[in-house]
Image (spheres, rainbow, N blue to C red):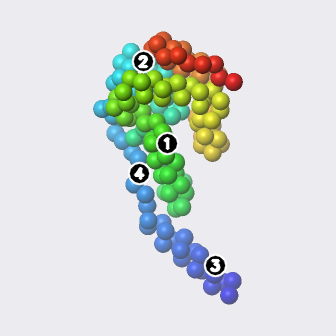
Amino acid sequence: MIKKILIGLLAILVIIQFIRPTKNEGNGIAANDISTVYTEMPIEVQTLLQQKCYDCHSHSTKYPWYANIQPVAWWLADHVEEGKEHLNFSEFKTYNAEKAAHKLEEVVEEVGEGEMPLKSYTFIHRDAVVTTEELALLRNWIASEGIAVGESH
């Protein structure tokens, strides 16, 4: 009986490998990318956003090898979709000035409070952890754009 259950579970695992979510892979910088709004953005800030945020908050996700295994791929697709609903750097130009400023304030707040990047992401992607220096760089750039940013805790 247990053998039949295990064979059934294995068959289900094999079958679900053929049910794949659409990948979030863009080519290059999107037409509405944040860099098209803030054309004087320092390259260090742009690189920081791309390396630490774009996998979940843009149209340019760089997928790890395990993103090809179901049900992990479904879970990742859901995370990326949810991340883009909250903030999408690839669509930043479509935000009005008030919304854009608020989104940048939230970036500093979420990162400063350790809410972003998600622990489930940085557990595997250690290079996505935002250092104190990187947070200061981001905060200083946002402040230089005339957007009020509070101190993180």
Sequence order check: which comes first, mark 1 or mark 4? 4
Q: Is residue 4 above or below residue 64?
A: below
Describe residue 60's horizontal placement relative to residue 109 as left or right.
Answer: left
Q: Say which residue label 3 marks.
A: 6
Q: Position of residue 119 (x, y in %)?
A: 64, 41
Residue 124 in sight here = no
Please say if the residues under marks 4 and 2 sit with CB atoms less than 8 Å apart. no
Q: Depth check: 140 or 63 in front?
A: 140
Q: CA distance from mark 1 to mark 3?
A: 36 Å
Residue at left 49%, top 46%? 82
Please say if the residues under marks 1 and 3 sit with CB atoms less than 8 Å apart. no
Q: Nearer the viewer, mark 1 or mark 4?
A: 1
Q: Nearer the viewer, mark 2 or mark 1?
A: 1
Mark 2 surroundings within 10 Å by alpha-carbon count, few (fewer than 14), some (14 through 19), many (20 or more): some
Residue at left 49%, top 42%? 83
User: Helix, strand or loop at disc 4?
Assistant: loop
Residue at left 44%, top 65%? 19
Q: Say which residue label 4 marks.
A: 23
If the image is split into quadrants, where does the N terminus sit? bottom right
Sequence order check: which comes first, mark 3 or mark 2? 3
